Amino acid sequence: MNERLEQIVRATRDSVERRRHEVPLAQLEGQLARHGEGRPFSEALSAPGTSVIAEHKRRSPSAGVIREGSTVAEIVEAYERGGAAALSVLTEETHFGGSLADLR
């Protein structure tokens, strides 16, 4: 693993551990129950034909800001129009500029 990737992995592990102490698992599960289930990921990928998983990230550690000024909703809608079967949203803050709010 290269040095930059190792740094991202370490920082993410630290962040996840910190979040575990800030928000109990039961609270997260309660939030999930209130919002209901999203689209079935595995079902979308098992449909006949080619299935594309589109990825949303606000920035890249190597390229910087991506599509500045665009909202998550605008980008997701464009992916849907383009035929994406499923969506990955990066919520890592430090290196990718995401947040859990991007999932709403």
Image (cartoon, rainbow, N blue to C red):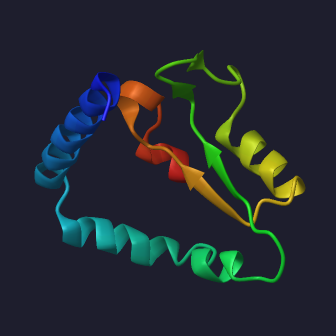
| 13 vs 15, nearest the viewer | 13
Report which quarter residue 51 is drawn in: bottom right
Quadrant housing the N terminus: top left
Viewer-proximal residue among 4 and 30: 4
Where does residue 28 sit, x and y in percent of width and height?
A: 30, 65
The front one of 101 and 44 is 44
**Residue at screen point 58% across, 73% down:** 38
In this rendering, the answer to whether 73 lies above or below 83 is above
Q: Does residue 94 appear to the left or right of 83 in the view shown? A: left
Q: Residue at x 77, y 41 (%)?
A: 74
Residue closest to the far left? 21
Identify the image quadrant of residue 15.
top left
Q: Residue at x 20, y 55 (%)?
A: 23
Position of residue 5 measured from the top left corner of the image (x, y, whole percent): 33, 31
| Viewer-side residue, 1 vs 96 | 1
Q: Position of residue 18 (x, y in %)?
A: 14, 43
> How far across and how far down the image is residue 71, in percent?
69, 34
Q: Residue furthest front?
A: 1
Give the residue drawn at x 74%, y 41%.
Answer: 75
Looking at the image, residue 58 sits to the left or right of residue 46; the answer is left
- On the picture, is 103 further left or further right than 85? left
Tell how many labels: 0
